[in-house]
Amino acid sequence: MTTLQVNGRAQPLDVDPSTPVLWALRDTLGLTGTKFGCGVAQCGACTVHLDGQAVRSCVTPISAAEGKKITTIEAITGGTDRVGKAVHAAWVKHDVAQCGYCQSGQIMSATAFLKSLPRGKQPSAADIDGAMAGNVCRCGTYARIRAAVADAARTLA
């Protein structure tokens, strides 16, 4: 038996410790906002925060998440997270989503990136591209993603 801290709540799980966080979230806890994309940490669709850091949940075993805070897209877009709300609003304003499949991972990466910046720092296009490089968008909305991240940073300043 393992207990994970997910979106501020203790969640007891009776699963193998080698189970990826992604499957514990989706199959056991019913948090389906985190998506399966590639299964090898290359696309970013499965991105969640582990103690505030963006991680690929498809390759992170629950044993590595014990004692740490896991935050999913459900808490970022549906909660009171100031940065998450700014990112989500910018995503809507810039009409980022096309098919939408990668968007939860994109938003999770953008949110972790903006939270890591010194207060008031405005990221350059290169900073944003570097932070978002691990997230693939098959629809190619990278210019809109960059604009939305920059817009969210301005809103937060």
Image (cartoon, grey):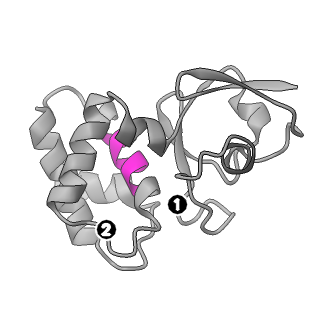
Q: Secondary structure at mark 1?
A: loop
The residue to which callout 1 is attached is 45
Which quadrant holds residue 82? top left
Q: Are marks 2 and 1 in contact (CB under 8 Å)?
A: no
Tell me the residue at 68%/63% (across/down): 40
Task: Indicate the position of residue 61 as horizontal and vertical percent values.
Answer: 76, 42
- Look at label 1 and name its amino acid: Ala
* Picture coordinates of residue 140, whole percent (x, y): 33, 78
N-terminal of the pair, mark 2 or mark 1, is 1
10 Å crowding of disc 2: few (<14), some (14-19), many (20+): some
Disc 2 to disc 1, C-alpha distance: 13 Å
Q: Residue at x 47, y 30 (%)?
A: 52
Name the one closer to the observer, 48 or 32. 32
Q: Disc 2 marks which residue?
A: 97
Label 2 element class: loop
Categorize mark 1 by other alpha carbons within 10 Å: few (<14), some (14-19), many (20+). many
128 vs 143: above or below = above
Magenta segment main secondary structure: helix
Residue at 38% x, 38% y is 78
Q: Residue furthest front?
A: 30
* Residue toward you, 75 or 146: 75
> Could you tell me if residue 125 is visible in this image?
no
Return the x and y of residue 16 as percentages of the image width and height. Answer: 89, 40
Question: Marks 2 and 1: which is nearer the front?
Answer: 2
